[in-house]
Image (tube, rainbow, N blue to C red):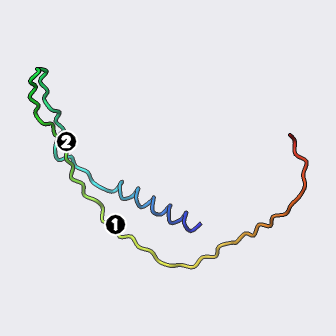
């Protein structure tokens, strides 16, 4: 159960981190110019560039005491009629 809580907290923090960043495109996309001749001279294309300002998040842990119920399961053998 404790692992699930930690996993849920980690996923929540990751979603918050991605949702709270500011992304600005700093360069436009440009496709290469292609000449159809046999002696094709290719001009390089360009991928877009982005400037990302991530949110400043401080993450830590602390210990707390909780009351957690414990369940005991007792296995007993019984003979049952089952259809076939």
Q: Are marks 1 and 2 in contact (CB under 8 Å)?
A: no
- Residue under numbered circle 1: 57
Nearer to us of marks 1 and 2 is 2
> Element at badge 1?
loop
Say which label, 1 or 2, has the lower sequence index: 2
Q: Is residue 1 left or right of residue 52?
A: right
Relative image position of residue 40 (x, y in whole percent): 10, 25
Q: Is residue 76 left or right of residue 43?
A: right
Q: Is residue 78 left or right of residue 11?
A: right
> Element at badge 2?
loop
Residue at point 59% right, 66% down?
1
Q: Is residue 27 above or below residue 65?
A: above
- Residue under numbered circle 2: 47
Give the quadrant of the C terminus: top right
Q: CA distance from mark 1 to mark 2?
A: 30 Å
Residue at point 80% right, 67% down?
74
Q: Is residue 47 above or below residue 65?
A: above
> Could you classify mark 1 by the number of other residues whose Cα lies within 10 Å: few (under 14), some (14-19), or many (20 or more)?
few
Relative image position of residue 7 (x, y in whole percent): 50, 62
> Could you classify mark 2 by the number of other residues whose Cα lies within 10 Å: few (under 14), some (14-19), or many (20 or more)?
few
* Residue 67 or residue 73, whichever sits in front: 73
Q: Is residue 46 above or below residue 67?
A: above
Residue at point 90% right, 55% down?
79
* Residue 46 or residue 12, whichever sits in front: 46
Relative image position of residue 29 (x, y in whole percent): 18, 38
* Residue 46 or residue 40, whichever sits in front: 40
Q: Quadrant of residue 83?
A: top right
* Residue 19 or residue 50, whichever sits in front: 50
Count of marks placed on residues: 2
Disc sitting over residue 19 in the figure: none
């Amino acid at each position: 159960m404790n692992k699930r809580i930690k996993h849920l907290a980690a996923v929540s923090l990751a979603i918050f981190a991605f949702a709270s960043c500011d992304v600005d495109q700093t360069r436009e996309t440009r496709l290469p110019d292609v000449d159809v001749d046999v002696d094709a001279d290719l001009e390089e294309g360009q991928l877009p560039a982005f400037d990302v300002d991530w949110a400043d998040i401080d993450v830590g842990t602390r210990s707390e005491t909780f009351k957690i119920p414990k369940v005991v399961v007792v296995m007993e053998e019984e003979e049952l009629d089952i259809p076939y």
